[in-house]
Image: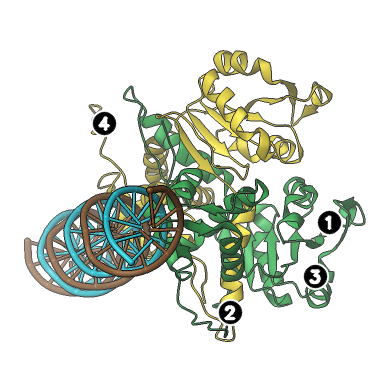
Chain colours: A yellow, B green, C cyan, D brown
Amino acid sequence: MPVERVRRRIPEATVARLPVYLRILVEQANLEVENISSEGLAELAGVNAAKVRKDLSYLGSYGTRGVGYEVAFLVYQIRRELGLTHDWPVVIVGAGNLGQALAGYGGFGERGFPVAGVVDIDPAKLDSVIGGVRVRHIDDLGQIVQSRQVSIGVVATPPAAAQDAADRLVRAGVTSILNFAPVVLGVPHGVSVRKVDLAVELQILSYYEQRRVGVGFHAIGSNDSGRGASA
Amino acid sequence: MPVERVRRRIPEATVARLPVYLRILVEQANLEVENISSEGLAELAGVNAAKVRKDLSYLGSYGTRGVGYEVAFLVYQIRRELGLTHDWPVVIVGAGNLGQALAGYGGFGERGFPVAGVVDIDPAKLDSVIGGVRVRHIDDLGQIVQSRQVSIGVVATPPAAAQDAADRLVRAGVTSILNFAPVVLGVPHGVSVRKVDLAVELQILSYYEQRRVGVGFHAIGSNDSGRGASA
DNA sequence: CTGACTTTGTGAACGTGTGCACATGTGCCT
DNA sequence: AGGCACATGTGCACACGTTCACAAAGTCAG
Protein backbone atom coordinates (compact mmCIF):
# COMPACT_ATOMS: atom_id res chain seq x y z
CA MET A 1 0.00 0.00 0.00
CA PRO A 2 1.11 3.54 -0.67
CA VAL A 3 2.57 5.56 2.16
CA GLU A 4 0.01 8.14 3.13
CA ARG A 5 1.38 10.09 6.03
CA VAL A 6 -1.15 12.85 6.30
CA ARG A 7 0.51 14.33 9.41
CA ARG A 8 -2.78 14.99 11.06
CA ARG A 9 -2.25 16.60 14.39
CA ILE A 10 -3.04 14.53 17.45
CA PRO A 11 -4.27 16.34 20.56
CA GLU A 12 -1.78 16.59 23.39
CA ALA A 13 -4.07 14.75 25.79
CA THR A 14 -4.36 11.86 23.39
CA VAL A 15 -0.62 11.68 22.82
CA ALA A 16 -0.20 11.32 26.56
CA ARG A 17 -2.60 8.39 26.67
CA LEU A 18 -1.31 6.46 23.68
CA PRO A 19 1.72 5.13 25.56
CA VAL A 20 -0.59 3.73 28.22
CA TYR A 21 -2.75 1.98 25.65
CA LEU A 22 0.39 0.69 24.01
CA ARG A 23 1.71 -0.87 27.19
CA ILE A 24 -1.60 -2.56 27.88
CA LEU A 25 -1.92 -3.81 24.32
CA VAL A 26 1.54 -5.31 24.42
CA GLU A 27 0.63 -7.09 27.64
CA GLN A 28 -2.54 -8.38 26.05
CA ALA A 29 -0.63 -9.57 23.03
CA ASN A 30 1.64 -11.54 25.34
CA LEU A 31 -1.46 -13.10 26.84
CA GLU A 32 -2.42 -14.20 23.34
CA VAL A 33 -5.41 -11.89 23.23
CA GLU A 34 -6.16 -11.20 19.58
CA ASN A 35 -8.94 -8.67 19.72
CA ILE A 36 -9.96 -6.07 22.25
CA SER A 37 -12.96 -3.78 22.43
CA SER A 38 -12.79 -0.11 23.32
CA GLU A 39 -14.57 -0.99 26.51
CA GLY A 40 -12.08 -3.67 27.41
CA LEU A 41 -9.14 -1.40 26.74
CA ALA A 42 -10.82 1.43 28.61
CA GLU A 43 -11.27 -0.80 31.62
CA LEU A 44 -7.62 -1.76 31.67
CA ALA A 45 -6.47 1.79 31.11
CA GLY A 46 -8.83 3.21 33.67
CA VAL A 47 -10.54 5.59 31.28
CA ASN A 48 -13.84 6.09 29.50
CA ALA A 49 -14.60 3.86 26.51
CA ALA A 50 -15.68 6.78 24.35
CA LYS A 51 -12.35 8.42 25.04
CA VAL A 52 -10.52 5.32 23.88
CA ARG A 53 -12.47 5.27 20.65
CA LYS A 54 -11.90 8.93 20.00
CA ASP A 55 -8.21 8.62 20.79
CA LEU A 56 -7.79 5.67 18.48
CA SER A 57 -9.80 7.34 15.74
CA TYR A 58 -7.02 9.93 15.42
CA LEU A 59 -4.80 7.14 14.15
CA GLY A 60 -7.35 6.16 11.55
CA SER A 61 -10.24 3.74 11.40
CA TYR A 62 -8.46 0.67 12.57
CA GLY A 63 -11.28 -1.03 14.42
CA THR A 64 -13.88 -3.46 13.19
CA ARG A 65 -17.47 -2.76 14.15
CA GLY A 66 -19.05 -5.57 16.03
CA VAL A 67 -15.62 -6.99 16.88
CA GLY A 68 -13.19 -4.47 18.28
CA TYR A 69 -9.54 -3.78 17.52
CA GLU A 70 -6.95 -6.30 16.47
CA VAL A 71 -4.34 -6.07 19.21
CA ALA A 72 -1.26 -6.70 17.10
CA PHE A 73 -2.29 -4.22 14.45
CA LEU A 74 -3.09 -1.52 16.99
CA VAL A 75 0.28 -2.04 18.63
CA TYR A 76 1.90 -1.51 15.26
CA GLN A 77 -0.10 1.62 14.52
CA ILE A 78 0.49 3.25 17.89
CA ARG A 79 4.19 2.43 17.71
CA ARG A 80 4.31 3.98 14.30
CA GLU A 81 2.48 7.10 15.36
CA LEU A 82 4.63 7.59 18.44
CA GLY A 83 7.78 7.13 16.43
CA LEU A 84 8.70 3.94 18.25
CA THR A 85 9.58 1.98 15.14
CA HIS A 86 13.21 2.55 15.95
CA ASP A 87 15.22 3.05 19.13
CA TRP A 88 15.87 6.48 20.59
CA PRO A 89 19.17 6.47 22.42
CA VAL A 90 19.25 8.83 25.40
CA VAL A 91 22.08 10.48 27.24
CA ILE A 92 21.87 11.07 30.98
CA VAL A 93 23.49 14.14 32.50
CA GLY A 94 24.30 13.68 36.16
CA ALA A 95 25.58 10.49 37.74
CA GLY A 96 24.28 11.15 41.24
CA ASN A 97 21.68 9.18 43.08
CA LEU A 98 18.99 9.59 40.49
CA GLY A 99 21.21 9.40 37.42
CA GLN A 100 22.59 6.10 38.63
CA ALA A 101 19.16 4.70 39.33
CA LEU A 102 17.95 5.73 35.90
CA ALA A 103 20.96 4.25 34.14
CA GLY A 104 20.71 1.07 36.20
CA TYR A 105 16.99 0.74 35.64
CA GLY A 106 16.73 -1.71 32.78
CA GLY A 107 13.32 -0.50 31.73
CA PHE A 108 14.72 2.18 29.47
CA GLY A 109 16.53 -0.03 27.04
CA GLU A 110 13.75 -2.58 26.96
CA ARG A 111 11.25 0.02 25.96
CA GLY A 112 13.31 1.41 23.12
CA PHE A 113 15.38 4.04 24.88
CA PRO A 114 18.87 2.61 25.35
CA VAL A 115 21.27 4.63 27.46
CA ALA A 116 23.89 5.87 25.04
CA GLY A 117 25.89 7.52 27.75
CA VAL A 118 26.05 8.96 31.24
CA VAL A 119 28.06 12.10 31.87
CA ASP A 120 28.97 14.06 34.94
CA ILE A 121 31.06 17.12 35.67
CA ASP A 122 32.62 15.65 38.78
CA PRO A 123 35.95 13.93 38.04
CA ALA A 124 35.43 11.69 41.06
CA LYS A 125 32.49 10.04 39.38
CA LEU A 126 34.22 9.30 36.10
CA ASP A 127 34.83 5.80 34.83
CA SER A 128 32.55 4.11 37.31
CA VAL A 129 30.28 1.75 35.44
CA ILE A 130 26.52 1.92 35.88
CA GLY A 131 24.16 -0.41 34.11
CA GLY A 132 26.89 -1.39 31.71
CA VAL A 133 27.72 2.19 30.79
CA ARG A 134 30.88 3.98 31.81
CA VAL A 135 30.44 7.48 33.22
CA ARG A 136 32.23 9.99 31.05
CA HIS A 137 33.05 13.64 31.46
CA ILE A 138 30.44 16.18 30.46
CA ASP A 139 32.85 17.62 27.91
CA ASP A 140 32.37 14.41 25.93
CA LEU A 141 28.69 15.20 25.54
CA GLY A 142 29.00 16.56 22.02
CA GLN A 143 30.95 13.55 20.90
CA ILE A 144 28.45 11.11 22.41
CA VAL A 145 25.46 12.89 20.93
CA GLN A 146 27.02 13.07 17.49
CA SER A 147 28.39 9.56 17.27
CA ARG A 148 25.33 7.88 18.75
CA GLN A 149 22.74 10.09 17.07
CA VAL A 150 21.19 11.04 20.38
CA SER A 151 18.25 13.40 20.27
CA ILE A 152 16.88 12.94 23.79
CA GLY A 153 18.68 14.08 26.91
CA VAL A 154 17.85 13.44 30.55
CA VAL A 155 18.74 16.03 33.16
CA ALA A 156 19.41 14.34 36.49
CA THR A 157 21.64 16.94 38.11
CA PRO A 158 21.17 18.99 41.26
CA PRO A 159 18.91 22.01 40.69
CA ALA A 160 21.76 24.51 40.50
CA ALA A 161 23.42 22.64 37.63
CA ALA A 162 20.28 21.86 35.65
CA GLN A 163 20.17 24.92 33.43
CA ASP A 164 23.81 24.49 32.51
CA ALA A 165 23.17 20.84 31.74
CA ALA A 166 20.26 21.80 29.50
CA ASP A 167 22.36 24.42 27.72
CA ARG A 168 25.07 21.89 27.05
CA LEU A 169 22.57 19.33 25.80
CA VAL A 170 21.06 21.85 23.42
CA ARG A 171 24.49 22.94 22.22
CA ALA A 172 25.36 19.31 21.60
CA GLY A 173 22.33 19.01 19.35
CA VAL A 174 19.73 17.39 21.58
CA THR A 175 16.18 18.50 20.79
CA SER A 176 14.17 16.81 23.54
CA ILE A 177 14.84 16.96 27.25
CA LEU A 178 13.39 15.05 30.16
CA ASN A 179 14.05 17.13 33.24
CA PHE A 180 14.15 15.66 36.74
CA ALA A 181 15.56 18.74 38.42
CA PRO A 182 13.11 20.99 40.25
CA VAL A 183 13.83 23.96 38.01
CA VAL A 184 12.07 25.60 35.11
CA LEU A 185 14.44 25.11 32.20
CA GLY A 186 14.85 27.77 29.57
CA VAL A 187 15.48 26.30 26.15
CA PRO A 188 15.47 27.66 22.62
CA HIS A 189 12.43 27.48 20.45
CA GLY A 190 12.17 24.08 18.87
CA VAL A 191 13.40 22.10 21.85
CA SER A 192 10.83 20.03 23.74
CA VAL A 193 11.00 19.73 27.50
CA ARG A 194 9.04 17.52 29.81
CA LYS A 195 9.58 17.57 33.49
CA VAL A 196 9.19 15.08 36.28
CA ASP A 197 9.21 16.70 39.69
CA LEU A 198 8.73 14.32 42.57
CA ALA A 199 8.21 17.03 45.16
CA VAL A 200 5.52 18.62 43.03
CA GLU A 201 3.67 15.32 42.75
CA LEU A 202 3.79 14.84 46.50
CA GLN A 203 2.59 18.36 47.10
CA ILE A 204 -0.38 17.80 44.83
CA LEU A 205 -1.23 14.67 46.80
CA SER A 206 -0.82 16.71 49.96
CA TYR A 207 -3.43 19.17 48.73
CA TYR A 208 -6.06 16.50 48.22
CA GLU A 209 -5.01 14.71 51.37
CA GLN A 210 -5.47 17.87 53.36
CA ARG A 211 -8.92 18.43 51.93
CA ARG A 212 -10.01 14.95 52.91
CA VAL A 213 -11.67 16.33 55.97
CA GLY A 214 -14.12 13.56 56.52
CA VAL A 215 -15.96 13.18 53.30
CA GLY A 216 -13.21 11.15 51.75
CA PHE A 217 -13.98 10.84 48.12
CA HIS A 218 -12.12 12.42 45.27
CA ALA A 219 -11.24 11.53 41.76
CA ILE A 220 -8.08 13.37 41.02
CA GLY A 221 -6.71 13.55 37.55
CA SER A 222 -3.32 12.15 36.94
CA ASN A 223 -0.84 14.00 34.77
CA ASP A 224 -1.67 12.16 31.60
CA SER A 225 -4.49 9.73 32.09
CA GLY A 226 -7.16 11.61 33.91
CA ARG A 227 -7.68 9.06 36.57
CA GLY A 228 -7.12 8.61 40.21
CA ALA A 229 -9.65 6.50 41.98
CA SER A 230 -11.77 3.53 41.22
CA ALA A 231 -14.23 1.50 43.16
CA MET B 1 -8.36 37.90 61.98
CA PRO B 2 -10.98 35.19 62.19
CA VAL B 3 -10.28 31.91 60.48
CA GLU B 4 -12.45 31.76 57.41
CA ARG B 5 -11.75 28.50 55.67
CA VAL B 6 -14.35 28.60 52.97
CA ARG B 7 -13.07 25.42 51.31
CA ARG B 8 -13.47 26.88 47.87
CA ARG B 9 -12.46 24.39 45.25
CA ILE B 10 -9.29 25.05 43.33
CA PRO B 11 -9.08 23.81 39.73
CA GLU B 12 -6.87 20.81 39.16
CA ALA B 13 -4.66 22.68 36.73
CA THR B 14 -4.04 25.39 39.27
CA VAL B 15 -3.24 22.92 42.04
CA ALA B 16 -0.56 21.48 39.78
CA ARG B 17 1.05 24.89 39.29
CA LEU B 18 0.98 26.09 42.86
CA PRO B 19 3.95 23.93 43.89
CA VAL B 20 5.97 25.49 41.09
CA TYR B 21 5.12 28.99 42.22
CA LEU B 22 5.93 27.98 45.75
CA ARG B 23 9.39 26.75 44.88
CA ILE B 24 10.16 29.93 42.97
CA LEU B 25 8.83 32.14 45.74
CA VAL B 26 10.94 30.38 48.33
CA GLU B 27 13.98 30.92 46.13
CA GLN B 28 13.12 34.58 45.78
CA ALA B 29 12.66 34.90 49.52
CA ASN B 30 16.15 33.50 49.98
CA LEU B 31 17.39 36.16 47.58
CA GLU B 32 15.78 38.74 49.88
CA VAL B 33 13.20 39.71 47.29
CA GLU B 34 10.25 41.17 49.18
CA ASN B 35 7.70 41.75 46.45
CA ILE B 36 7.04 40.15 43.12
CA SER B 37 4.63 41.01 40.33
CA SER B 38 2.50 38.51 38.51
CA GLU B 39 4.63 39.19 35.47
CA GLY B 40 7.86 38.55 37.33
CA LEU B 41 6.56 35.31 38.77
CA ALA B 42 5.15 34.29 35.41
CA GLU B 43 8.53 34.81 33.79
CA LEU B 44 10.26 32.61 36.35
CA ALA B 45 7.60 29.94 36.17
CA GLY B 46 7.48 29.97 32.39
CA VAL B 47 3.78 30.75 32.17
CA ASN B 48 1.43 33.53 31.24
CA ALA B 49 1.04 36.45 33.69
CA ALA B 50 -2.75 36.36 33.52
CA LYS B 51 -2.62 32.71 34.47
CA VAL B 52 -0.54 33.52 37.51
CA ARG B 53 -3.02 36.15 38.63
CA LYS B 54 -5.99 33.89 38.12
CA ASP B 55 -4.28 31.04 39.92
CA LEU B 56 -3.38 33.21 42.88
CA SER B 57 -6.84 34.73 42.96
CA TYR B 58 -8.19 31.32 43.96
CA LEU B 59 -6.30 31.69 47.22
CA GLY B 60 -7.87 35.07 47.85
CA SER B 61 -6.95 38.65 47.06
CA TYR B 62 -3.47 38.66 48.43
CA GLY B 63 -1.83 41.07 46.02
CA THR B 64 -1.50 44.82 46.19
CA ARG B 65 -2.39 46.73 43.07
CA GLY B 66 0.41 48.82 41.78
CA VAL B 67 2.92 46.80 43.79
CA GLY B 68 2.55 43.06 43.38
CA TYR B 69 2.56 40.22 45.88
CA GLU B 70 4.50 40.09 49.12
CA VAL B 71 6.71 37.04 48.69
CA ALA B 72 6.72 35.85 52.29
CA PHE B 73 2.98 36.16 52.64
CA LEU B 74 2.32 34.33 49.39
CA VAL B 75 4.63 31.53 50.47
CA TYR B 76 2.61 31.22 53.64
CA GLN B 77 -0.71 31.21 51.84
CA ILE B 78 0.31 28.65 49.23
CA ARG B 79 1.80 26.40 51.90
CA ARG B 80 -1.41 26.66 53.83
CA GLU B 81 -3.56 25.88 50.85
CA LEU B 82 -1.45 22.90 49.81
CA GLY B 83 -1.49 21.55 53.31
CA LEU B 84 2.25 22.01 53.73
CA THR B 85 2.05 23.56 57.17
CA HIS B 86 3.11 20.26 58.61
CA ASP B 87 5.22 17.34 57.41
CA TRP B 88 3.74 14.40 55.56
CA PRO B 89 5.78 11.30 56.27
CA VAL B 90 5.88 8.85 53.37
CA VAL B 91 6.54 5.15 53.20
CA ILE B 92 8.33 3.65 50.22
CA VAL B 93 7.42 0.16 49.04
CA GLY B 94 10.22 -1.48 47.09
CA ALA B 95 13.90 -1.19 47.90
CA GLY B 96 15.18 -1.83 44.42
CA ASN B 97 17.05 0.55 42.21
CA LEU B 98 14.43 3.24 42.26
CA GLY B 99 13.31 2.79 45.85
CA GLN B 100 16.89 3.20 47.01
CA ALA B 101 17.40 6.30 44.93
CA LEU B 102 14.21 7.83 46.26
CA ALA B 103 15.08 7.05 49.86
CA GLY B 104 18.61 8.32 49.38
CA TYR B 105 17.51 11.48 47.62
CA GLY B 106 17.52 14.06 50.37
CA GLY B 107 15.03 16.29 48.59
CA PHE B 108 12.04 14.52 50.10
CA GLY B 109 12.73 15.29 53.72
CA GLU B 110 13.81 18.84 52.97
CA ARG B 111 10.56 19.57 51.26
CA GLY B 112 8.36 18.27 54.02
CA PHE B 113 8.04 14.60 53.08
CA PRO B 114 10.35 12.67 55.40
CA VAL B 115 10.81 8.99 54.64
CA ALA B 116 9.10 7.20 57.50
CA GLY B 117 10.10 3.81 56.22
CA VAL B 118 11.20 1.64 53.35
CA VAL B 119 9.80 -1.84 53.01
CA ASP B 120 10.46 -4.74 50.67
CA ILE B 121 9.20 -8.27 50.33
CA ASP B 122 12.61 -9.73 49.61
CA PRO B 123 14.35 -10.96 52.80
CA ALA B 124 17.72 -10.38 51.13
CA LYS B 125 17.12 -6.64 51.10
CA LEU B 126 16.14 -6.35 54.76
CA ASP B 127 18.14 -4.39 57.26
CA SER B 128 20.30 -2.62 54.73
CA VAL B 129 20.29 1.08 55.51
CA ILE B 130 19.41 3.63 52.84
CA GLY B 131 19.40 7.33 53.48
CA GLY B 132 19.41 6.72 57.21
CA VAL B 133 16.43 4.39 57.08
CA ARG B 134 16.58 0.66 57.64
CA VAL B 135 14.72 -1.49 55.14
CA ARG B 136 11.99 -3.48 56.86
CA HIS B 137 9.75 -6.30 55.77
CA ILE B 138 6.54 -5.44 53.98
CA ASP B 139 4.57 -7.14 56.75
CA ASP B 140 5.61 -4.27 59.00
CA LEU B 141 3.79 -1.83 56.75
CA GLY B 142 0.72 -1.57 58.93
CA GLN B 143 2.80 -0.92 62.00
CA ILE B 144 4.85 1.78 60.28
CA VAL B 145 1.80 3.52 58.85
CA GLN B 146 0.00 3.48 62.17
CA SER B 147 2.83 4.53 64.42
CA ARG B 148 4.18 7.23 62.13
CA GLN B 149 0.78 8.48 60.95
CA VAL B 150 1.69 7.95 57.31
CA SER B 151 -0.94 8.84 54.76
CA ILE B 152 1.18 8.86 51.59
CA GLY B 153 2.74 5.76 50.08
CA VAL B 154 5.21 5.45 47.23
CA VAL B 155 5.11 2.40 44.99
CA ALA B 156 8.58 1.68 43.65
CA THR B 157 8.24 -2.02 42.92
CA PRO B 158 8.51 -3.96 39.67
CA PRO B 159 5.30 -3.78 37.62
CA ALA B 160 4.11 -7.24 38.61
CA ALA B 161 4.21 -6.41 42.30
CA ALA B 162 2.71 -2.93 42.08
CA GLN B 163 -0.94 -3.79 42.50
CA ASP B 164 -0.18 -5.92 45.52
CA ALA B 165 1.88 -3.10 46.98
CA ALA B 166 -0.99 -0.69 46.45
CA ASP B 167 -3.45 -3.10 48.04
CA ARG B 168 -1.24 -3.45 51.08
CA LEU B 169 -0.80 0.30 51.36
CA VAL B 170 -4.53 0.84 51.24
CA ARG B 171 -5.14 -1.90 53.77
CA ALA B 172 -2.58 -0.28 56.04
CA GLY B 173 -4.54 2.96 55.88
CA VAL B 174 -2.69 5.00 53.30
CA THR B 175 -4.98 7.30 51.31
CA SER B 176 -2.59 8.78 48.74
CA ILE B 177 -0.26 6.87 46.46
CA LEU B 178 2.54 7.99 44.19
CA ASN B 179 3.05 5.22 41.69
CA PHE B 180 6.31 4.74 39.79
CA ALA B 181 5.44 1.36 38.35
CA PRO B 182 4.20 1.26 34.76
CA VAL B 183 0.83 -0.15 35.73
CA VAL B 184 -2.64 1.27 36.14
CA LEU B 185 -3.41 0.80 39.81
CA GLY B 186 -6.89 -0.07 40.97
CA VAL B 187 -7.69 1.51 44.30
CA PRO B 188 -10.88 1.99 46.31
CA HIS B 189 -12.91 5.12 46.06
CA GLY B 190 -11.40 7.79 48.24
CA VAL B 191 -7.77 6.96 47.56
CA SER B 192 -5.79 9.36 45.39
CA VAL B 193 -3.23 8.06 42.96
CA ARG B 194 -0.70 9.96 40.92
CA LYS B 195 1.66 8.21 38.63
CA VAL B 196 5.09 8.93 37.29
CA ASP B 197 5.98 6.79 34.32
CA LEU B 198 9.37 7.47 32.82
CA ALA B 199 8.79 5.40 29.71
CA VAL B 200 5.58 7.26 29.01
CA GLU B 201 7.36 10.59 29.26
CA LEU B 202 10.04 9.43 26.85
CA GLN B 203 7.45 8.12 24.43
CA ILE B 204 5.69 11.45 24.42
CA LEU B 205 8.98 13.15 23.63
CA SER B 206 9.49 10.57 20.93
CA TYR B 207 6.22 11.55 19.31
CA TYR B 208 7.16 15.20 19.01
CA GLU B 209 10.71 14.29 18.08
CA GLN B 210 9.44 12.14 15.26
CA ARG B 211 7.18 14.89 13.97
CA ARG B 212 10.08 17.31 13.86
CA VAL B 213 10.46 16.69 10.17
CA GLY B 214 12.26 19.84 9.28
CA VAL B 215 10.06 22.59 10.53
CA GLY B 216 11.37 22.27 14.03
CA PHE B 217 9.16 24.35 16.18
CA HIS B 218 6.71 23.09 18.71
CA ALA B 219 5.46 24.18 22.06
CA ILE B 220 4.51 21.05 23.84
CA GLY B 221 2.61 21.16 27.04
CA SER B 222 4.25 19.72 30.07
CA ASN B 223 2.25 17.65 32.52
CA ASP B 224 1.49 20.47 34.87
CA SER B 225 2.91 23.74 33.61
CA GLY B 226 1.85 23.96 30.03
CA ARG B 227 5.23 24.83 28.74
CA GLY B 228 7.92 23.33 26.64
CA ALA B 229 9.90 25.80 24.66
CA SER B 230 11.08 29.31 25.00
CA ALA B 231 13.13 31.62 22.85
C1' DC C 1 -4.11 66.73 47.56
C1' DT C 2 -3.98 65.71 42.89
C1' DG C 3 -2.76 63.23 38.95
C1' DA C 4 0.05 59.97 36.52
C1' DC C 5 1.47 55.43 36.69
C1' DT C 6 1.55 50.66 37.99
C1' DT C 7 -0.42 46.21 38.76
C1' DT C 8 -4.13 43.48 40.44
C1' DG C 9 -8.55 40.93 39.90
C1' DT C 10 -12.00 39.36 36.81
C1' DG C 11 -15.65 39.29 32.96
C1' DA C 12 -15.87 37.51 28.56
C1' DA C 13 -14.25 35.17 24.42
C1' DC C 14 -11.92 31.45 22.81
C1' DG C 15 -9.88 26.88 22.52
C1' DT C 16 -9.29 22.25 24.16
C1' DG C 17 -10.96 18.06 26.18
C1' DT C 18 -14.74 14.90 27.70
C1' DG C 19 -18.72 12.06 27.38
C1' DC C 20 -23.25 10.98 25.68
C1' DA C 21 -25.98 9.08 22.27
C1' DC C 22 -26.79 7.15 18.05
C1' DA C 23 -26.26 6.06 13.16
C1' DT C 24 -23.39 3.07 10.67
C1' DG C 25 -21.05 -0.93 9.55
C1' DT C 26 -19.74 -5.96 10.49
C1' DG C 27 -20.08 -10.72 11.64
C1' DC C 28 -22.78 -14.60 13.19
C1' DC C 29 -26.66 -17.57 13.43
C1' DT C 30 -30.59 -19.57 11.66
C1' DA D 1 -30.08 -14.82 2.43
C1' DG D 2 -31.90 -12.17 6.00
C1' DG D 3 -32.02 -10.38 10.42
C1' DC D 4 -30.02 -9.57 14.81
C1' DA D 5 -26.67 -8.39 18.14
C1' DC D 6 -22.70 -5.91 18.86
C1' DA D 7 -19.07 -2.38 18.76
C1' DT D 8 -17.05 1.34 16.20
C1' DG D 9 -16.78 6.17 14.77
C1' DT D 10 -18.50 10.79 15.33
C1' DG D 11 -21.78 14.97 15.86
C1' DC D 12 -23.08 17.62 19.59
C1' DA D 13 -23.37 19.69 24.04
C1' DC D 14 -21.08 20.61 27.98
C1' DA D 15 -17.16 21.40 31.23
C1' DC D 16 -12.71 22.96 31.91
C1' DG D 17 -8.68 25.80 31.03
C1' DT D 18 -6.36 29.79 28.87
C1' DT D 19 -5.79 34.37 27.40
C1' DC D 20 -7.18 39.07 26.50
C1' DA D 21 -8.49 43.39 27.91
C1' DC D 22 -9.92 46.63 31.12
C1' DA D 23 -11.92 48.74 35.32
C1' DA D 24 -10.74 49.17 40.04
C1' DA D 25 -7.43 50.03 43.44
C1' DG D 26 -3.43 51.15 45.08
C1' DT D 27 1.45 53.91 45.09
C1' DC D 28 4.38 57.79 44.65
C1' DA D 29 6.12 62.38 43.27
C1' DG D 30 5.54 67.08 43.44
Q: Is disc 1 on the same chain as disc 3? A: yes
Query: Alpha-carbon neighbours of circle 2 within 10 Å: few (<14), some, or many (≥20)?
Result: some
Quote the CA–CA distance across marks 2 and 3: 22 Å
Name the residue beneath numbered marker 2.
Answer: A212
User: Could one spot residue B171 in this view of the protein?
Assistant: yes
* Horizontal side of residue A11 vs A140, given as left or right: left
Residue drawn 52% across the image and 45% down it: B200
Rendering quarter of residue C13: bottom left
Choose mark 4 or mark 2, whichever is in front.
2
* Residue A62 x, y percent position in the rendering: 29, 47
Mark 1 belongs to which amino acid? Asp
Q: Please tell me which of labels 4 and 2 falls first in the chain.
A: 4
- Residue in the foreground of this view, choosing between B94 and A210: A210
Q: Please tell me which of labels 3 and 1 falls first in the chain.
A: 1
Name the residue beneath numbered marker 1.
Answer: B122
Quarter the N terminus of chain A occupies:
top left
Name the residue beneath numbered marker 3.
Answer: B141
Rendering quarter of residue B221: top left
Q: What subunit carries mark 1?
A: B
- Residue in the foreground of this view, choosing between B102 and B199: B102
Residue drawn 48% across the image and 67% down it: B62
* Residue B29 x, y percent position in the rendering: 64, 52
Quote the CA–CA distance across marks 4 and 2: 48 Å
Mark 4 belongs to which amino acid? Arg
